[in-house]
């Protein structure tokens, strides 16, 4: 990845802080919103951990380890729906009802500002976590107004999964660095395998589309927000990015079925041998390499950086952080549970079981992990160069507007120009200071 991308990512993190500082909200005050750090973290006893689906079983394994050592402070996993949008909705409903049902929340990295500003989560004591040993972009996602409200447990950077066996057979020596190179590789493979699809990502109308749309714009040299925090989706670069997705649908480079793909639908398609290229998070690696018969592509694929318009692309920063509900009991237990789950030992066990990206920097140089997951250096670069989504207090409205624009253009309901013009207007209103 280029130094330019790294600078752009750092700049946007700074921009997000400026935008957030100027946004009005119903729950923040001059102190920055949320509860206090140490004073609010009292009480011990059983807690509930609200999270998305545990696809590997390792989350339950770690919880079982905790419960064995803490019989009076047991943790119960509450599995929320698969889609990120639905997880967020359930957590917000719980918070708005001031319910004690959820204690620890597994938050998408982009939700921190919204949950902190509305006082749905409490401030956490930064000095009780060795944050200097974590990836800096991941740490920044847990902060709002320079205070910490969520601890980075899983990071994420987008990767290009590709069928190396098929590229080798077609005489394609290297994974593509640009969109044109990817199309050329697909043409060569499909010359003898017409039934296989070229490329897919997460294109259903949900948070994954916000991620993929952002990546397309960034990989064409644009950004959703400029360095002053103003929306810039009325640019040629944004048009080029969205057109990559729109023209991909029209030309069938992107299979028609991919408009319904979230992470799991796309993963299953790739594992079933239906795709040459797939934009996906690291968690797919272990599942697609399973040798229990669940994957038809085990040992046949590799990963590379995302391609872009004229050079390698730029990932959207992903991941999940753990936070504590402001309305929960037994917050002291919750804090200790987060520390346990975020230890180097626990994070390493999670990488081995799930291939998800750790947030501790030392694990990217761990010999055992590198032997099993040789892509870790590529993943680390993806994360360090990644650009965050707009970190707005009104994030629900921002992401909905982005999804509406991208989905409308990709399905042919509106033109690229009209979709971006309307999105520009909406974002100007939602990020106005």
Image (cartoon, rainbow, N blue to C red):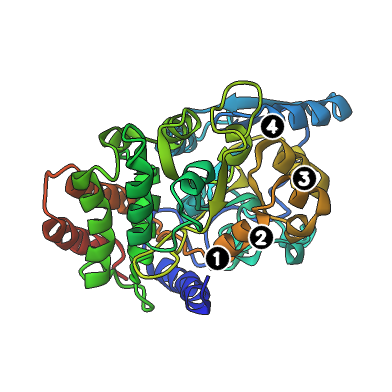
Which image quarter is the C terminus in?
bottom left
Q: Tell me the element at label 1.
A: loop
Picture coordinates of residue 135 (x, y %)? 66, 62
Identify whether 63 is placed above or below 150.
above
Mark 2 and mark 1 lie on one chain; the one further toward the N terminus is 1
Mark 2 and mark 4 lie on one chain; the one further toward the N terminus is 4
Q: Nearer the viewer, mark 2 or mark 4?
A: 2
Asked whether disc 2 touches disc 1, contact meaning CB atoms under 8 Å apart, the reply is no
Q: Which mark is residue 59?
A: 4
Picture coordinates of residue 200 (x, y %)? 37, 43
Q: Say few, some or many: other residues with alpha carbon within 10 Å of mark 2 (under 14 / 14 to 19 / 20 or more).
A: few
Picture coordinates of residue 212 (x, y %)? 37, 51
Identify residue for label 2.
377
Mark 3 and mark 1 lie on one chain; the one further toward the N terminus is 1
Q: Nearer the viewer, mark 3 or mark 4?
A: 3
Identify residue for label 1.
31
The answer to whether any part of residue 393 appears in the image is yes
Q: Say few, some or many: other residues with alpha carbon within 10 Å of mark 1 (under 14 / 14 to 19 / 20 or more).
A: few
Snapshot quadrant of residue 123: bottom right
What is the C-alpha distance between the residues marked 3 and 1? 36 Å
Identify residue for label 3.
348
Mark 3 and mark 2 lie on one chain; the one further toward the N terminus is 3
Residue under the point 60% across and 64% down: 381
Q: Nearer the viewer, mark 1 or mark 4?
A: 4
Residue under the point 50% across and 67% down: 30
């Amino acid at each position: 990845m280029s130094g330019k991308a790294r600078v752009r990512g750092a700049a946007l993190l700074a921009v997000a802080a400026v935008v957030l500082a100027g946004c009005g909200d119903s729950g923040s005050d001059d102190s920055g919103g949320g509860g206090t750090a140490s004073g609010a973290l009292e009480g011990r006893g059983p807690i509930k951990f609200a999270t998305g689906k545990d696809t590997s079983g390792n989350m339950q394994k770690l919880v079982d380890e905790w419960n064995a050592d803490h019989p009076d402070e047991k943790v119960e996993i509450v599995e929320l729906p698969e889609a990120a949008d639905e997880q967020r909705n359930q957590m917000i409903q719980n918070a708005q009802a001031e319910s004690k049902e959820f204690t620890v929340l597994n938050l998408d990295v982009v939700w921190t500002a919204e949950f902190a500003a509305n006082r749905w989560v409490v401030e956490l004591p930064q000095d009780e976590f060795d944050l200097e040993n974590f990836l800096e972009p991941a740490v920044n996602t847990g902060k709002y107004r320079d205070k910490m409200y969520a601890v980075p447990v899983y990071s994420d950077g987008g990767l290009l999964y590709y069928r190396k066996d098929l590229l080798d057979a077609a005489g394609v020596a290297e994974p593509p660095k640009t969109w044109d190179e990817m199309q050329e590789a697909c043409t060569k493979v499909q010359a003898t395998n017409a039934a296989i699809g070229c490329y897919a990502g997460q294109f259903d109308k949900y948070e994954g589309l916000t991620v993929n749309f952002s990546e397309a714009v960034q990989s064409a040299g644009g950004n959703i927000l400029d360095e002053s925090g103003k929306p810039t989706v009325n640019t040629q670069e944004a048009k080029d990015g969205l057109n990559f997705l729109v023209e991909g649908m029209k030309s069938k480079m992107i299979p028609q079925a991919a408009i319904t793909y979230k992470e799991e639908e796309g993963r299953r398609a790739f594992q079933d041998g239906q795709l040459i290229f797939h934009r996906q998070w690291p968690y797919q690696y272990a599942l697609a390499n399973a040798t229990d018969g669940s994957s038809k592509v085990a040992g046949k694929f590799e990963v590379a950086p995302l391609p872009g318009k004229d050079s390698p692309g730029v990932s959207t920063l992903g991941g999940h952080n753990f936070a504590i509900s402001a309305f929960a009991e037994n917050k002291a237990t919750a804090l200790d549970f987060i520390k346990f789950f975020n230890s180097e030992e626990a994070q390493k066990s999670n990488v081995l079981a799930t291939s998800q990206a750790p947030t501790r920097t030392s694990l990217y140089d761990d010999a055992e992990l590198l032997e099993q997951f040789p892509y870790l250096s590529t993943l680390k670069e993806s994360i360090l160069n990644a650009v965050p989504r707009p970190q707005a207090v009104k994030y629900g409205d921002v992401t909905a507007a982005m999804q509406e624009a991208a989905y409308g253009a990709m399905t042919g309901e509106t033109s690229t120009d009209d979709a971006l013009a309307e999105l520009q207007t909406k974002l100007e209103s939602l990020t106005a200071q």
